[in-house]
Image: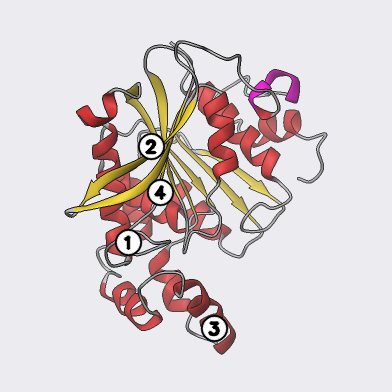
């Protein structure tokens, strides 16, 4: 769905399976275009933090929402190798009253340690642990309302976090089954060259990542892992990037008792370059409807 006379039809149609009365318009989503009123006592702020994982201190950004008390919180997981960080989405969520922890993984963008898919999953688990720790308490984290949101490889990590029963909900944006995607990415010279360029921003190699993917075919099954997200609420957003089938499969697997996750398809590319506002609006609408303010 293209254009920007959009959101009423987009959300009302695409999210019918999630909740009734999902329709929002730009006028009712001020976080898309308006700064929140300044709270002098409890201002919005951006903190640089380091969360512990496997004995290392890994870098992350914590967007703290304005206002006293605890706030619902999103753990934001970027893709491979982290070109698209979705920090514009983090700012929208912060203005809307959500804290957002945007992390880096080991061995990418200057973070210490060795990059691997397994370490991505371990680091995501560690970030959840940090959000629930005394070290994070000062930032007003509502530990009962932590939602994991992952894009691309971050969607893979999000699916792998289905085994954390304390997570309140999940958002998958163009989630990539990294086992299948990595093996498939080496089947042609052009695909392998593109994959090698992405891998060059990590401290791993194409051969190591392909070997890891092949080693985990049985213990990282996409549908089986996605099923663990149920019965928590799930939003899946896909695009015309060639991997929409992975998102559809995750949604189908995460269907408890016939209640299908909300699924939206957008006619755009993998980074949603011409749909950033629509993407933000869909995520904010779903979060606020699924997790109403207390």
User: In the image, which is nearer the foreground, mark 4 or mark 1?
Assistant: 1
- Prevalent SS, magenta region: helix
Q: Give the alpha-carbon distance from disc 3 to disc 4, as whole Å.
A: 32 Å
Percent position of residue 86, x then y = 55, 46
Span highlighted in magenta in the image: 26-31
Percent position of residue 27, x then y = 75, 20
Q: Are marks 3 and 4 in contact (CB under 8 Å)?
A: no
Residue position marked by numbered label 4 in the rendering = 253
Q: Give the alpha-carbon distance from disc 2 to disc 3, as whole Å.
A: 40 Å
Residue 219 found in image quarter: bottom left
Q: Is residue 66 left or right of residue 224?
A: right
Residue sticking out furthest to the front: 40
**In this rendering, is residue 214 above or below 78?**
below
Residue 162 found in image quarter: top left
Residue 75 found in image quarter: top left
Residue position marked by numbered label 2 in the rendering = 256
Q: Are marks 2 and 3 in contact (CB under 8 Å)?
A: no
Residue position marked by numbered label 1 in the rendering = 221
């Amino acid at each position: 769905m293209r254009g920007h006379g959009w959101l009423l039809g987009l959300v009302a149609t695409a999210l019918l399976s999630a909740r009734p009365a999902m329709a929002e318009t730009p006028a009712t989503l001020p976080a898309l275009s308006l700064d929140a009123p300044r709270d002098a006592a409890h201002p919005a702020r951006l903190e640089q933090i380091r969360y512990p994982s496997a004995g290392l201190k890994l870098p992350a950004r914590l967007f703290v929402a304005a206002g006293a008390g605890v706030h619902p919180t999103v753990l934001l997981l970027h893709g491979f190798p982290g070109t698209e960080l979705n920090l514009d989405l983090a700012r929208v969520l912060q203005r809307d009253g959500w804290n957002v922890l945007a992390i880096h993984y080991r061995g990418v963008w200057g973070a210490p340690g060795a990059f691997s898919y397994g370490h991505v999953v371990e680091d995501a688990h560690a970030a959840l642990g940090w959000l629930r720790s005394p070290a994070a308490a000062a930032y007003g984290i509502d530990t009962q309302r932590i939602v994991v949101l992952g894009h691309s490889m971050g969607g893979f990590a999000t699916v792998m976090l289905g085994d954390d029963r304390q997570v309140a909900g999940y958002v998958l944006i163009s989630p990539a089954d990294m086992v299948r995607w990595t093996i498939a990415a080496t089947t042609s010279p052009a695909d392998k060259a593109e994959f090698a360029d992405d891998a060059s921003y990590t401290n791993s190699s194409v051969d190591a990542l392909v070997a890891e993917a092949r080693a985990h075919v049985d213990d990282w099954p996409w549908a089986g892992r996605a099923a663990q997200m149920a019965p928590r609420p799930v939003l899946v957003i896909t695009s015309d990037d060639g991997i929409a089938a992975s998102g559809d499969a995750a949604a189908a697997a995460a269907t408890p008792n016939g209640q299908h996750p909300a699924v939206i398809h957008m006619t755009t590319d993998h980074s949603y370059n011409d749909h950033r506002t629509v993407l933000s609006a869909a995520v904010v609408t779903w979060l606020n409807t699924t997790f109403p303010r207390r």
